[in-house]
Image (cartoon, rainbow, N blue to C red):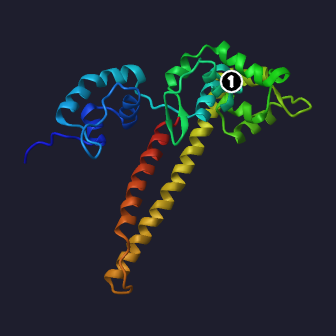
Amino acid sequence: MPAQTDLGANQLAVRLGLARWQLRVGREHGLLPEPDLDGERWSAGLVEECAHRCGQVVTRFGEEPPIGAIRAAARLAMRTGLDVERRDVEVLVARDHLEVVSSFRGHPLYLLRDLDALDPEKVRDVVAARKGPLFDTVEAGGAVTILGWPRKTFDRIAGERTLAKDRFGRYALADIRALAADDELAREVREEKRRRALAKARRAETDIEDVVRGWLLRCTAYVDRAVEEPPDPALLGRAIRGLAGTRAETAKYEQETG
């Protein structure tokens, strides 16, 4: 059988060793040529051209996929110790401090390394302009974003440490930063998050196992002529793939013990 010379998008990404998002963003920024054949396919000659250019894509955009504004704000919040919000990210873009690298379903996307390279003072200026005299205080939601903790964990620790609130129910930003700087507390929270994630993965695993067992029972009933219709084979395929994924996730959290 002759080798296939023209490639579709998925095949091209595999051939180039790129993720689909890298291929898409590379095309959007003109680093990779658009397909020259019907059906969104690249001819053999264009595939070779893409191969010569794919290094530019990795150099320009890195290997970590871009993220949306909410996750971008959370990343900046944890890095700067400020309760950064989505609107702050948009202001940073408007001030030309941050580039929108692509979009997904109409929502802008940002590179992690661009976010990590942002001058903290520029982020501070934007947050301060939004908050005004409330700059040195933060609501519980903002505290959770800065710390990267589950809300239940923050509420528990805030109660245990009797963190003071002002008349608006806001916490002192200095107190939240002190929590973030507490290494022993950080280890405790990481372990708590791991336990919760492990419990969630185990519940998901049990639920999927029940789906598989139910499918097998229906299959047996069909074989024994107890029912007229066989179970849907696609259901089993999805369940098995899901089970493999949840078991891998469970194993990962179990290995993180300690």
x%, y% of residue 232?
A: 37, 71
Tell which of 89 and 6 is nearer to you.
Answer: 6
Which residue occupies 64% across, 15% down?
A: 120
Q: Judge from the rendering whether residue 87 lies leftward or rightward of residue 216; answer left or right.
A: right
Toward the left, the furthest residue is 1
x%, y% of residue 156?
A: 75, 38
> Is residue 85 visible to the viewer in this orientation of the structure?
no
The residue indicated by pointer 1 is 180
Q: SS of the residue at dot 1?
A: helix
> Is residue 126 visible to the viewer in this orientation of the structure?
yes
Which residue occupies 63% across, 29% down?
A: 73
Toward the right, the furthest residue is 167
x%, y% of residue 87?
A: 68, 30
Tell which of 29 and 131 is nearer to you.
Answer: 29
x%, y% of residue 48?
A: 20, 28
Other residues around mark 1 within 10 Å, as few (<14) / some (14–19) / many (≥20): some
Tell which of 233 and 222 is nearer to you.
Answer: 233
